[in-house]
Image (cartoon, grey):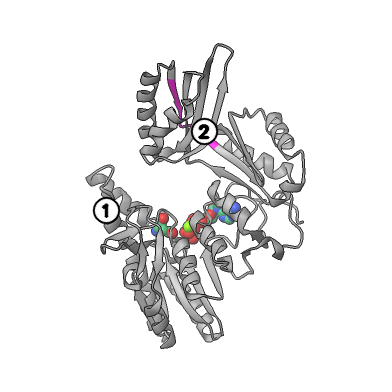
Amino acid sequence: MSLLVQKYGGTSVGSVERIQAVAERVEAARVAGHSIVVVVSAMSGETDRLLNLARAIKNPPPSRELDAVLATGEQVTIGLLAMALLARGVDAVSYTGGQVRILTDSAFNKARILDIDASNVHTELKAGKVVVIAGFQGIDDQGNVTTLGRGGSDTTAVAMAAALKADECQIYTDVDGVYTTDPRIVPEARRLDRITYEEMLEMASLGAKVLQIRSVEFASKYQVTLRVLSSFVDGPGTLITTEENIMEAALISGVTLNRDEAKLTIVGVPDRPGVASTILGPIADANIEVDMIVQNSGADGAADFTFTVHRNEYDQALAICQQTNLEMKARAVQGDKRIVKVSIVGVGMRSHAGIASRTFRALAAEGINIQMISTSEIKISVVIDEKYGELAVRTLHAEFGLAEQV
Ligand code: ADP
Ligand code: ASP
Ligand code: MG
C-alpha cells in the first residue's frame, strides 16, 4: 500500500460532472489499497473571474485583499470534492491551506512555501480518510491568507508529497503527459515517457505551463517522484525523474513558446563602466525580474542596452527606464510588447555541437528575424516578433524531428 498525492487542475474539476469523475478516480485508488491526499485547483476560469472582479473594484488590486479573494476558488472545490467522495461512501475531509498549516512568506500573490506541518493530515490518513487540500494557498506567520502565483496548485501538491514522503505525486490535467511541445500549437507533438527534472525545469521556466516552475524545483530538491497524467483518459503519463533513470538522452526534448515577456531598449547609452548597474539597479529595486539582457557597443562610443521583463511589469519598467534615460543622458527608450521567446531544451545538447547553428538556419529559412539570443548548457532561446511565434515552434519541432519516436 502506498501513499499517493493526486493533484487535479482546473479543467479536471471544471463542472459537477468532472468533480464526480475525479471522485470516481480517487475511489478506485482507495479500493486498490492506496492512501490518498488530493490537491485541487479552482474550477477552470474561476481564478480569472475572481481576478477580474477584484480589478473592477481597484486596479491593480491591493495584494493582501486580492489573495483573500483568489483563495476562495479552491475552497469551493475542496468542499465539493469531499462531498462527492462522501456521497460515494469514501470517507473524506477537506482542508484549506491554512487548516493544514502550509506556512508561507508574506509575499502576497507570489508567496513561497516555508514549512508544512503535516501532522493533521497524517492523523486523518491514519483514520482512513482521503484528505482533500486546497491548492495554490497558504498562510503566513501573521495568519494572513496567501497565494502561490498562477498555476500554484502544482507546487502545493509537490510540497505536500515531499512533506508526507509520499510514494508518488500525480499531476492530473487535460493532457496525458508532457509533450515535446504544446500539443495545442503542434498537433504532431509527441508525449514523452520520461523527462529529467533539469529539462522540465527549463521547459516550465521557458513557457511550458503544464507544470508551475516551483513545483519542479521542489520535486528536484526533495527527489519527489512526479508524474503528469490525464484525468480524462488512462495512460502511463510522463515521469519526471533524474538523468540516471533515462537510458538514452534525446538531443532535444522539447520546444517552448513564452508569450509573457516584453522588451525594453535604452538607445545611445554612454559606453562606460557601471552602465548595466545604473540601468538595472532601479529595476531590481522595484522587484522587477529581468530575463534576457543584451548590450552592444557601437563605434561612436555609445551602446544600446536591451532587456526583457514580464509583460505584467512592462509599464512599470518602461517608466523606470524613461527616468534612467534622462539621468544618463541617453538617446531614447524603445519598448516592444509584441515579442515572444521560443526555446529548445535538451540535456543531449551538452554533448553535441552545431545545435545553435541548425536552429538559426532553420528560422532564417522561414524568414524569421532573431532579435535576441540566450543560451545555457541545455537550452537555446531566441526573441522574435510575436507573429512568428507558432511558426518558429513548428519549424524547430520539425527541424529536430521531435514528432518521431526515439
Ligand atoms: P491544469 O489546469 O490542469 O493545471 P494547465 O492548463 O495549467 O492545466 O496545463 C495543461 C496545459 O499545458 C495543456 O492543456 C497544454 O496546452 C499546455 N502545455 C504547454 N506546453 C505543454 C507541453 N510541453 N506538454 C503538455 N502540455 C503543455
Ligand atoms: N487556480 C489557480 C490558477 O488558476 C492555481 C492553479 O490552478 O494551479 O492559477
Ligand atoms: Mg496548471
- The amino acid type, in three-letter code, at marker 2 is Ile
- The amino acid type, in three-letter code, at marker 1 is Arg
Q: Position of residue 372 (x, y in %)?
A: 58, 31
Task: Tell me, yes or no, if residue 231 can be seen here.
Answer: no
Disc 2, ligand 1: is the CB inside 8 Å? no
Let me know if residue 335 is in the magenta part: yes
- Classify residue 393 as left or right of residue 102: right
Q: Residue furthest left?
A: 57
Residue 399 in which image quadrant: top right
> How much space separates mark 1 and mark 2, taking CA atoms?
32 Å
Q: Is residue 77 above or below residue 311?
A: below
Residue at 37%, 38% in the rendered image: 285
In this view, the residue in front, 301 or 181, is 301
Q: Position of residue 406 (x, y in %)?
A: 77, 56
Q: Position of residue 368 (x, y in %)?
A: 63, 29
The magenta span reads 333-340
Residue at 39%, 84% in the rendered image: 123
The circle drawn on residue 339 is 2
In this view, the residue in front, 283 or 364, is 283
The circle drawn on residue 64 is 1
Residue 394 in which image quadrant: top right
Q: Position of residue 142 (x, y in %)?
A: 26, 62
Q: Which quarter of the rendered picture does the N terminus lie within?
A: bottom right
